[in-house]
Image: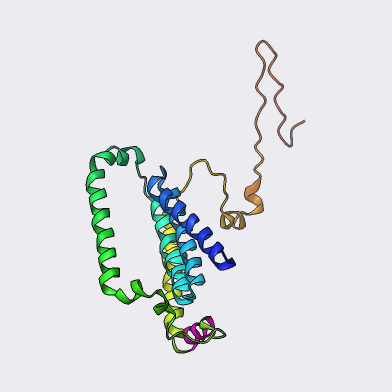
């Protein structure tokens, strides 16, 4: 087994583990984090297959934007995990049937749609560029030359969406001791300390204090 095959099996093992934890995690936030790990491993496998565009798209679009927004949405929603798990085994047969149907459809599409790939796997490498060709360089030149404005607009939209999700998730905590800096700046020196003249409280049975002479009287 060569160096590249070892990395492939390592990434594939982590991908399968993360995918399994996505559907078995008890916490919805943990499930989203495992899904992000699965996307990262899939992007690494795409890099091994010399599909840099798919890897970059998976990281930037799904891992960097969509899944982050999903994470904030899940954190914002108060999901009752126990209530969701009550009907798990009741709906499991239907879910398993749907999984088998989807798997059968994928097999049929791959077998009848790409028969030459099943017979000769080397067909995937035909028509490829020379070994020294850099796909990443060409993608960078296209993204920051011909598609500069669409990329920048998409980045701004994703940034605004992320800030909106953070603002929705951020709730005011009653036990927080945070102080508003604007209030501190507007405080005046005269408002910081106020001196009050309070007469002492006489003790029970003690003589009352002598009356204070007014000004101008002996």
Image location of residue 3, percent across then percent down: 59, 66
- Residues in magenta? 136-145
Q: Is residue 151 above or below residue 31?
A: below
**Quadrant position of the C terminus in the picture:** top right
Q: Which residue is drawn at 56% across and 53% down?
A: 180
- Residue 24 is a magenta residue: no
Q: Which residue is drawn at 44% across and 54% down?
A: 16
Figure disc tally = 0
Q: Which residue sits furthest right?
A: 218
Q: Residue at x 43, y 48 (%)?
A: 21
27 horizontally vs 105: left or right: right
Q: Which residue sits furthest bottom?
A: 146
Q: Nearer the viewer, residue 115 or 52?
A: 115
Q: Which colour scheme is used?
A: rainbow
Is residue 170 at least partly visible in the picture?
Answer: no
Q: Is residue 158 above or below residue 29?
A: below
Image location of residue 145, percent across then percent down: 49, 89
Is residue 80 at least partly visible in the picture?
Answer: yes
Q: Nearer the viewer, residue 134 or 8?
A: 8
Q: Is residue 60 above or below residue 9?
A: below
20 horizontally vs 211: left or right: left
* Principal secondary structure, stretch drawn in magenta: helix
Image location of residue 85, percent across then percent down: 32, 40
179 horizontally vs 101: left or right: right
Q: Residue at x 23, y 39 (%)?
A: 90
**Quadrant position of the N terminus in the picture:** bottom right
Q: Is residue 14 above or below residue 153?
A: above
Q: Which of 49 and 148 is in front in this view?
A: 49
């Amino acid at each position: 087994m060569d160096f590249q095959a070892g990395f492939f099996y390592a990434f594939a093992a982590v991908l399968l583990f993360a995918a399994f934890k996505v559907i078995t995690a008890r916490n919805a936030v943990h499930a989203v984090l495992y899904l992000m790990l699965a996307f990262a491993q899939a992007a690494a496998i795409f890099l091994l297959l010399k599909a840099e565009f798919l890897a970059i798209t998976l990281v930037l679009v799904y891992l960097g934007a969509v899944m982050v927004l999903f994470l904030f949405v899940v954190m914002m929603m108060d999901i009752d995990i126990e209530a969701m798990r009550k009907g798990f085994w009741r709906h499991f047969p239907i879910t398993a049937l749907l999984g088998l149907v989807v798997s059968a459809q994928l097999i049929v599409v791959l077998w009848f749609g790409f028969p030459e790939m099943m017979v000769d796997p080397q067909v995937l490498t035909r028509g490829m560029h020379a070994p020294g060709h850099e796909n990443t360089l060409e993608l960078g030149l296209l993204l920051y030359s011909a598609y500069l404005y669409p990329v920048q607009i998409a980045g701004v939209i994703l940034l605004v969406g992320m800030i909106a999700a953070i603002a929705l998730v951020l709730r005011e905590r009653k036990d927080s001791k945070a102080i508003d800096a604007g209030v501190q700046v507007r405080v005046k020196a005269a408002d910081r300390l106020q001196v009050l003249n309070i007469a002492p409280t006489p003790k029970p049975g003690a003589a009352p204090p002598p009356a204070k002479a007014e000004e101008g009287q002996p």
